[in-house]
Image (cartoon, rainbow, N blue to C red):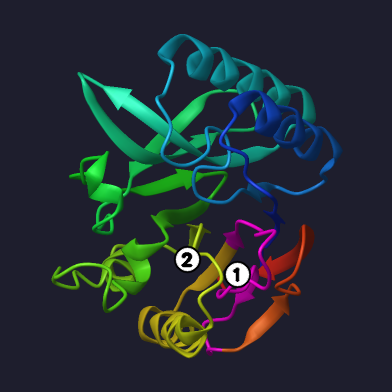
């Protein structure tokens, strides 16, 4: 069975890009993983006026670091395209190329105050691994976060051949959401027969309401970080051929 080493970073996300970027670069330079996942909006921070020049320069630095460390990084960022703002995951491959992007397809009501929903669900193929990306509410479609239909994006990715879903999160500390988030992750993994790798943003107000770690296709945590403070994990996923 092929083995894929995945890592996730649970980090405090500042509204200032110049505070987030050095932390992201340090994690890229120090990892030995094949794939390194960061939280939603981990580069730019949430609800900011994105500077195209500064953001694009940061993307170039991340691409260079991926090439030097031979790692594929999945970066949460704000993005402006043709005058529209999106919440995005950018996938930079181990040779520094942009493998592709995922724009958040089911933004919450608060997200939609400043961003547009994405339009395309993609499956990526890299080094023999088929994988997809989801951003926070894309997977959960959490009650109370908007009157939106559930497109079952994890199921769609599984049906299209994805073996791993990388789920970047920035979900906060509301404890009432913990049972829904945890059971939802498990059920999506079972339904779709996929591993779900998660990375949530740490929160200085307290314990976050969704775990950072790896959920198995059988619906159990293979690794689960504490919900308090900054955390990292590394785990070897064995994919059946």
Q: Residue 124: horizontal and vertical position, in percent?
A: 41, 46
Number of marks in picture: 2
Left or right placement of residue 168 versus residue 52 in this view = right
- Residue 130 in which image quadrant: bottom left
Residue contact between numbered discs 1 and 2, judged by CB atoms under 8 Å: yes
Magenta-span inclusion, residue 212: yes
In magenta, the rendered stretch is 199-219
In the drawing, what numbered circle is on residue 239? 1
Task: Name the residue located 25 percent from the left edge and 53 percent from the top edge.
Answer: 105
Magenta stretch contains residue 162:
no
Where residue 57 appears, x then y in whole percent?
A: 56, 12
Real-space Cα distance between discs 1 and 2? 8 Å
**Residue 137, placed above or below residue 215:** above
Q: Quadrant of residue 139?
A: bottom left
Residue drawn at x 60%, y 69% as measured from the top left: 239
Q: Which residue is mark 2?
A: 163
Residue occupying image coordinates x 53% and y 65%: 172
> Does residue 182 appear in the picture of this structure?
yes
Q: Within 10 angstroms of label 2, few (less than 14), some, or many (20 or more) residues?
A: many
Residue at 66 percent across and 59 percent down: it is: 202
Give the farthest residue toward the front.
205
Observer-nearest residue: 9 or 145?
145
Q: Secondary structure at mark 1?
A: loop
Residue placed most toward the observer, 209 or 214: 209
Instruction: Please tell me whether residue 66 is drawn above or below residue 7 in the rendered image.
Output: above
Identify which residue, 225 or 66, lies in the foreground.
225
Q: Position of residue 182 (x, y in %)?
A: 51, 84
Position of the C terminus, as image quadrant, is bottom right
Pick the residue in front: 32 or 187: 187
Pinpoint residue 179: horizontal percent, then vertical percent.
Answer: 49, 90
């Amino acid at each position: 069975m092929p083995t894929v080493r995945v890592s996730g970073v649970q980090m405090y996300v500042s509204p200032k890009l110049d505070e987030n970027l050095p932390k992201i670069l340090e994690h890229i330079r120090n990892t030995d993983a094949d794939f390194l996942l960061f939280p939603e909006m981990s580069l730019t921070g949430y609800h900011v006026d994105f500077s195209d020049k500064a953001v694009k320069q940061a993307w170039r630095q991340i691409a260079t670091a991926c090439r030097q460390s031979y790692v594929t990084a999945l970066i949460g960022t704000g993005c402006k395209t043709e005058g529209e703002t999106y919440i995005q995951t950018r996938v930079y491959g181990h040779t520094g190329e942009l493998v592709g992007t995922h724009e958040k397809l089911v933004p919450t009501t608060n997200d939609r105050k400043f961003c547009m929903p994405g339009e395309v669900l993609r499956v990526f193929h890299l080094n023999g691994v088929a994988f997809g990306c989801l951003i926070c509410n894309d997977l959960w479609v959490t009650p109370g976060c908007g009157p939106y239909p559930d497109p079952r994006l994890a199921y769609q990715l599984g049906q299209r051949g994805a073996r791993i879903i990388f789920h970047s999160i920035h979900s906060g500390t509301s404890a009432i959401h913990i049972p829904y988030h945890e059971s939802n992750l498990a059920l999506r993994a079972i339904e779709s027969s996929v591993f779900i790798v998660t990375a949530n943003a740490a929160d200085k107000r307290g314990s976050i309401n969704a775990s950072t770690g790896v959920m198995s296709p059988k619906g159990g945590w293979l690794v689960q970080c504490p919900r308090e403070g900054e955390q990292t994990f590394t785990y070897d996923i064995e994919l059946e051929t």
